[in-house]
């Protein structure tokens, strides 16, 4: 019996009777300490008891079993795994005041932190547990300890709209203008979440209109999120004296763009843009015209911002132009580095895709991707997401082409001209990721390597779609060479990701290469594998477990006969052993199949391979007997 799991489950379920039976059944001190301190799913019995609010279980573990009151664990909150959470943090986050009091009374450190430097006080502020906040502060909790992003307790209380906690923290002289790592303040968080009462409270306590690292003021933050009431209040402060004329105009124009894209209120957007235009061209003051000379962008249909007040009403008759106006205005005010700029470009592209306007979608998505690659670091999550969206779009289009037209919509074919620009950018992003990986300390390499692997999977996804084009009898002249050139640019990078796997390894596994999986055709992977082999992928490279691509094909796609045949025809050795001494045939046999039902193994065994196997099998002495150039052949057989 796994007593560790039994103890954990009893603590998780609050079954004190069962817990006592297993922990005090004649166990020695060392065994008891081991069971109480052992982790199941990353959490100790005390951590999970505090997470779930089982007071009697926690008390028993502390008092009778001498559980370590500071030993952290991993717990789930709102679908997110919190790493390194001490028991007190778990109880505070979950809102269990009696447990918080128990832990503090037994000596738990009130300022202990999770792996992201979140304190129990911050955890209580997040979900509005006022009584716990007050108790922790009264017992020495520091209100100014911020998490790794620089977000303080006051910031999170304001963002989540907990006015009672915000008042309490401000009464304790919490720093109202403290900035996070990205430069935002509590006033930014409040403007973004939309709580006018908390906004007024912060202003009463001296909050100032600072800018964050994106150049955003709280006024612009409210405009981006569409909180009209916050915008109006900030514009009207002290008769408008606290906001400059340019800031007021930018806020109204940006709010209008939000009305178009987020609220889908075209008339409301025009009214806001009219107010801004009136402010630009007052009847009794100096004009403040919009900047001119900005290049027209193809993705935005070459639209130029409206500068004439009389043209604003005309926009309502052309929703498409209005949407492009919103994108242009947002990019001008926020700049290409702000996440919302590319987000709404991608969003608008997705809307066009849903309407069957795939060309417009691709154009906008390329615009967003170019912004991200220019402004963000290599293989950033946003860039990964954009690349993945392209791959999913192309797979959807290819899949829809095989079905009868829906609602009269005809989906155009996916062409090499569609795929190649994305492939080029994805491969270039891989190069940037590898360069970044080489500069990373060992402690940070795994995260970057994971990002590189995700981009590599997108490249393989695109390559699999290109491979399908090779099967089309009426493909244009020169496409085959261009496809092989594009995929060669990927293979020649010789990338190895987690577990030492190459692009060919990943192709043989198939998982994460969405193209083949979307179509559901069991032969899809074979075309990709064949293409990779044709442009130079080595089928006999081994991963961290000594597996060649053939081993992984046997383990992950045993029914993909064409994949196996393609590898063997491409030069894969059928009798190479991995580091566990397994050959391809061994793996197939372990799965209950006969290798002869897939291929004839004798067809792919050379005399050299048979001789090498005999040397290993009979343990013949070969060192200093056979040429050194044959050592590797013998070792791998």
Image (cartoon, rainbow, N blue to C red):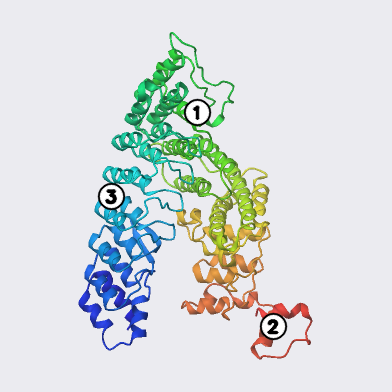
Please give left or right for residue 390 compared with residue 200 in the image. right
Disc 3 crowd rating (10 Å Cα; few below 14, some 14-19, many 20+) is many
Left or right, residue 160 beside residue 278: left
| Mark 3 to mark 2 CA distance (whole Å) | 70 Å
Which quadrant of the figure contains the N terminus? bottom left
The mark lying in front, picked from 3 and 2, is: 3
Q: Secondary structure at mark 2?
A: helix
Disc 1 + disc 2, Cβ < 8 Å: no
First-in-chain label (1 vs 2):
1
Q: Is residue 474 visible?
A: no
Question: How crowded is the residue under tag 2: few (<14 C-alpha within 10 Å), some, or many (20+)?
Answer: many
Name the one closer to the observer, 271 or 454: 271
Quarter of the image for residue 25 reads: bottom left
Question: For this rendering, which residue is in front, 197 or 466?
Answer: 197
Q: Position of residue 627 (x, y in %)?
A: 79, 81
Residue 377 location (% of width, % of height): 57, 47
> Does dot 1 land on a helix, a strand or a loop?
helix
Q: Going 34% across and 31% down the picture, which residue do you hit?
A: 230
Separation of marks 1 and 3 at Cα, in angstroms: 39 Å
Spatial separation of the CA atoms under disc 1 and disc 2: 67 Å
Residue drawn where x is 54% and y is 79% of the image: 586
Assess disc 1: are there few (<14), some (14-19) or many (≥20) residues with their C-alpha within 10 Å of its C-alpha: many
> Is residue 406 shown left or right of residue 387?
left
Asked whether the residues under the numbered discs 1 and 3 touch, taking CB atoms below 8 Å apart as contact, a structural biologist would say no
Q: Which residue is mark 3?
A: 128
- The tag on residue 328 is 1
Q: Earlier in the sequence, mark 3 or mark 2?
A: 3
Q: Residue at 34%, 55% (x, y): give it.
A: 121
Which residue carries the number 2 mark?
Answer: 612
Residue 46, label in figure: none
- Give residue 190's quadrant in the image: top left
């Amino acid at each position: 019996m796994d007593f560790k799991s039994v103890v954990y489950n009893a603590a998780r379920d609050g079954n004190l009777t069962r817990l006592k039976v297993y922990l005090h059944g004649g166990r020695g001190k060392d065994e008891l300490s081991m069971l109480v301190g052992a982790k199941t799913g990353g959490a100790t019995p005390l951590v999970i008891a505090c997470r779930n609010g089982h007071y009697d279980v926690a008390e028993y573990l502390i008092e009778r079993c001498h559980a370590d009151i500071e030993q952290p664990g991993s717990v789930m909150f709102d679908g997110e795994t919190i790493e390194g959470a001490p028991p007190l943090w778990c109880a505070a986050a979950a809102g269990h005041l009696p447990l918080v009091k128990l832990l503090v009374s037994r000596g738990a450190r009130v300022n202990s932190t999770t792996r992201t430097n979140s304190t129990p006080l911050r955890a209580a502020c997040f979900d509005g547990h006022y009584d716990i906040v007050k108790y922790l502060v009264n017992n020495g909790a520091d209100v100014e300890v911020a998490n790794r992003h620089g977000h303080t307790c006051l910031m999170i209380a304001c963002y989540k709209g907990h006015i009672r906690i915000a008042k309490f923290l401000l009464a304790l002289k919490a720093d109202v203008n403290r900035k996070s790592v990205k430069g935002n303040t509590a006033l930014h968080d409040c403007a973004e979440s939309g709580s006018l009462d908390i906004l007024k409270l912060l202003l009463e306590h001296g909050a100032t209109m600072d800018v964050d690292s994106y150049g955003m003021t709280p006024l612009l933050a409210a405009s981006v999120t569409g909180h009209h009431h916050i915008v109006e209040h900030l514009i009207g402060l002290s008769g408008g004296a606290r906001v400059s004329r340019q800031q007021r105009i930018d806020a109204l124009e940006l709010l209008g763009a939000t009305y178009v894209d987020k609220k889908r209120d075209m008339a409301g957007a025009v009214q806001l843009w009219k107010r801004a235009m009136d402010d630009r061209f007052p009847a009794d003051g100096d004009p403040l015209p919009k900047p001119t000379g900005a290049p027209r962008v193809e993705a935005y249909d070459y639209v130029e911002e409206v500068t004439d007040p009389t043209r604003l009403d005309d926009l309502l008759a052309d929703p498409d132009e209005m949407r492009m106006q919103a994108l242009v205005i947002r990019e001008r005010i926020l700049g290409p580095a702000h996440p919302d700029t590319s987000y709404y470009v991608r969003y608008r592209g997705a809307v066009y895709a849903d309407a069957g306007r795939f060309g417009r979608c691709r154009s906008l998505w390329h615009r967003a991707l170019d912004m991200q690659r220019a402004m963000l670091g290599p293989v950033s999550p946003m860039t990964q997401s954009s690349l993945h969206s392209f791959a999913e779009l192309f797979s959807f289009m290819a899949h829809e082409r095989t079905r009868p037209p829906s609602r009269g919509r005809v989906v155009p074919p996916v062409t090499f001209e569609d795929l190649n620009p994305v492939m080029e950018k994805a491969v270039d992003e891989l190069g940037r990721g590898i360069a970044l990986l080489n500069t990373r300390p060992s402690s940070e390499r795994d995260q970057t390597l994971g990002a590189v692997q995700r981009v590599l999977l997108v490249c393989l996804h695109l390559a699999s779609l290109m491979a399908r084009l090779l099967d089309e009898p009426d493909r244009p002249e020169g496409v085959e060479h261009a496809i092989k050139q594009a995929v060669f640019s990927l293979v020649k990078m010789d990338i190895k990701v987690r577990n030492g796997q190459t692009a060919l390894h990943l192709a043989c596994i198939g998982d994460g290469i969405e193209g083949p999986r979307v179509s559901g055709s069991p032969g899809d992977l074979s075309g990709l594998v064949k293409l990779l082999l044709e442009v130079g992928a080595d089928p006999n490279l081994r991963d961290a477990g000594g597996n060649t691509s053939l081993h992984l094909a046997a383990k992950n796609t045993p029914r993909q006969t064409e994949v196996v045949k393609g590898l063997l025809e491409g030069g894969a050795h059928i009798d190479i052993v991995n580091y566990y001494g397994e050959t391809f045939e061994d793996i197939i046999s372990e799965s209950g199949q006969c290798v002869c039902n897939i291929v004839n193994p004798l067809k792919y065994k050379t005399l050299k391979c048979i001789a090498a196997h005999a040397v290993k099998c009979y343990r013949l002495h070969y060192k200093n007997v056979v040429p050194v150039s044959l050592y590797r052949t013998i070792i791998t057989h």
